[in-house]
Image: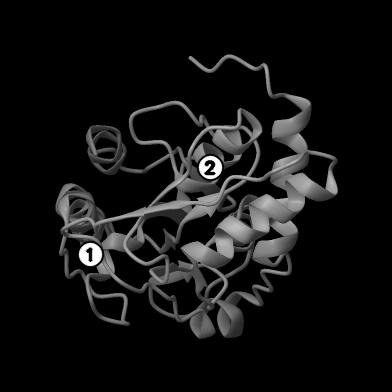
Amino acid sequence: QIGLNSICDQSPIETIIYEYSPTPSTMVNFTWTGSNSLNGLGVTASVSGTNQFAIQGTPSTGVTQTTIYTYQIETVGLRYFNVFGKRQDPHGAYAAVIPKWTADMIANQDIWINGDGETSRDFCYIDNTVEANILAATQQHKSESRIFNVAMGDRTTLNQLHNYIKNSLIESGLAISKEPIYRDFRIGDVRHSQADISKISDTLSYLGSVRVESGIKKTVKWYLKEKNISFG
């Protein structure tokens, strides 16, 4: 948030992902990213925080929107949904579920699932996120500044996710015999999350061609190759 505030305090802005106008000192496109948590429990791109991640991100969104109106800068906002892929740290306090489960399965550790495993998320492989960033930074936007969801427009349950990772490891030669252990649903968790990606598909021609299961296979192969890696 502090970094974004500093960037938005500059006029003209000359950093992040941008396009130059004929005058190098003038920026005509400013692309910023944020969490899908800002969507709250709704399906639109309006700010409606319902958890700590949304609350933390709301001020940054407000600063960006103020800058848009003050300096008449054309911006594109990208809201990421559950991005995963290579190089995610599986050991951190806030480790995402995919790297954590992958590392734990490789190490033959127990896998814990909160609730019945039917909680779902719109998981998005990193290559799709890169595609969205490139499209946002390089295309000319003829309309007003916009915010786009970056996801697959689909839901994957935790049970499905567990099976994808497990099957990918088995296909790679590992013997995975442990079943997941279910425990109480975590208070405050959203039961289901799914993005509407029609706007980014129609406006930026975003494809999101790497499906979740395919992305899991790519991710698992990397962790198997780098299973002794030490993350800082």
Query: Which residue position is annotated with label 1?
Result: 69
The foreground one among 36 and 104 is 104
Give the vertical position of 208 relative to 124 (above or below). Answer: below
Q: Distance between the residues labelled 1 and 2?
A: 44 Å
Residue at (44% x, 53% y) in the render: 30
Residue at (57% x, 66% y) in the render: 160
Give the vertical position of 112 relative to 109 (above or below). Answer: below
Where is residue 175 drawn, in percent x and y?
75, 40
Tell me the element at label 2: helix
Check disc 2 and give the amino acid type.
Answer: Trp
**Left or right placement of residue 48 versus residue 12 in this view:** left
Q: Image quadrant for the N terminus?
A: top left
**Left or right placement of residue 146 versus residue 178 in this view:** left
Q: Can residue 5 be seen in this view?
A: yes
Q: Residues within 10 Å of mark 2 (few under 14, many from 20)?
A: many
Q: Can residue 127 be seen in this view?
A: no
- In which quarter of the view is residue 94 placed? top left
The foreground one among 161 and 209 is 161
**Left or right placement of residue 154 versus residue 67 in this view:** right
Q: Which is more foreground, mark 1 or mark 2?
A: 2
Looking at the image, tell me whether mark 1 or mark 2 is earlier in sequence order: 1
**Left or right placement of residue 215 versus residue 82 in this view:** right
Q: Residue 7 carries which label?
A: none
Query: Which residue position is annotated with label 2?
Result: 101
Residue at (46% x, 54% y) in the render: 31
Where is residue 108 drawn, in percent x and y?
60, 32
Where is residue 188 drawn, in percent x and y?
17, 60
Check disc 1 and give the amino acid type.
Answer: Tyr
The foreground one among 1 and 144 is 1
Q: What count of labels does the image hold?
A: 2
